[in-house]
Amino acid sequence: MELVQTPFAPRPKELDPVEGVGWGNRASLRLVSGPTYHSIELVTDITDPSDIERVEVSLNGSAKINVTGETLVKLQAHRKNYAQDGRYVISFGDATLRTKIGVRQTDLVTLGGEIWFVYITLKSKPAGTTPPRIRARAHVLPAQSVRYYMPRIYELTWFASATGRTPFDFSERSPALNLKRIHFLDSSVDRVRVLRDSFEEMNVTKADNAYDLAQAKKEQNPDWFSLDFIRYGFGADGMLNTAARSQLAFELDKSAVGSVPVIVEAVEQVNALPSKG
């Protein structure tokens, strides 16, 4: 595969101007198709992440990355990557991993003829407020002829109608979909069990999970419960495959009733890997 055979040397590149930047607007950036994107960075004077309501990276109108500005900041904090106020990084590849295939597996491979856009939805502010500034840059790698993996980051919400143990079915299960990390943005989650059909894949308390993350040099963000399946640095080995005969469930033990915002970091295999023969 080209991701293994070609050199790993991402080069910084300025992207085209971001169009339609203004408070209350959905600004857009057309990505040039062809390069492999290791990361995209929005360089802004917006120091409050909540002012960026949504960042989407879409292929032919279908969002593959769909998160808030606050989520982008917290995901970088979880990985303990260097950060700077006003810079919002969409990391496709993962430089925290230990092998070349792990680092590059979730790079964003774009192909000729595809339509890729980055959309930035900004919070509405009173008339007369000075408009923000946004420019975009990326770290890119040479083009690849075939895309085998598609990186995905998205948000959803679960609701617990009672305290105690509540199982939530992960409905988007597939042999082609693997979870890198899943984050529960709820301080009342005290324990998480992962159940595949009748088999228990994982069972960990909040305190033990925080210790495991710290030992792996990862960060448990305040009020989060982050299951990092690749925290040891071996992406392909550690990811949780979502295939199941009847159910893949995340059982949350909660001390309070209410909604649980969830952030999913995943990779989807979109083409069969070439045979070794």
Image (cartoon, grey):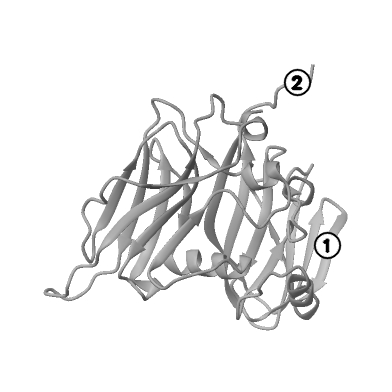
Left or right of 121 in this view: 218: right
Name, please, the residue furthest toward the top: 277
Q: Position of residue 276 (x, y in %)?
A: 78, 21
Bin the neighbour count of mark 2 within 10 Å (Cα to Cα): few under 14, some 14-19, many 20 and up: few
Question: Quarter of the image holding residue 205?
Answer: bottom right
What residue sits 37% from the left and 48% below the top?
118
Query: Which-is-in-front pick, marks 2 and 1?
Result: 2
Reading the image, the residue beneath label 2 is: 275
Q: Position of residue 217 (x, y in %)?
A: 72, 70
20 or 204: nearer the viewer:
20
Amino acid type indicated by mark 2:
Ser
What is the spatial separation of the Cα atoms under label 2 and label 1, in whole angstroms? 32 Å
Q: Would you say the residues marked 2 and 1 are in contact, meaning their CB atoms lie under 8 Å apart?
A: no
Amino acid type indicated by mark 1:
Met
Left or right of 115 in this view: 218: right
What residue sits 42% from the left and 47% below the top?
57
Say which quadrant the N terminus sits in: top right
Q: Position of residue 49 (x, y in %)?
A: 40, 72
Reading the image, the residue beneath label 1 is: 202
- The secondary element bearing badge 2 is classed as loop
Name, please, the residue furthest toward the right: 199
221 or 109: nearer the viewer:
109
Bin the neighbour count of mark 1 within 10 Å (Cα to Cα): few under 14, some 14-19, many 20 and up: few
In the rendered structure, which disc, 2 or 1, sits on the residue that comes first in sequence? 1
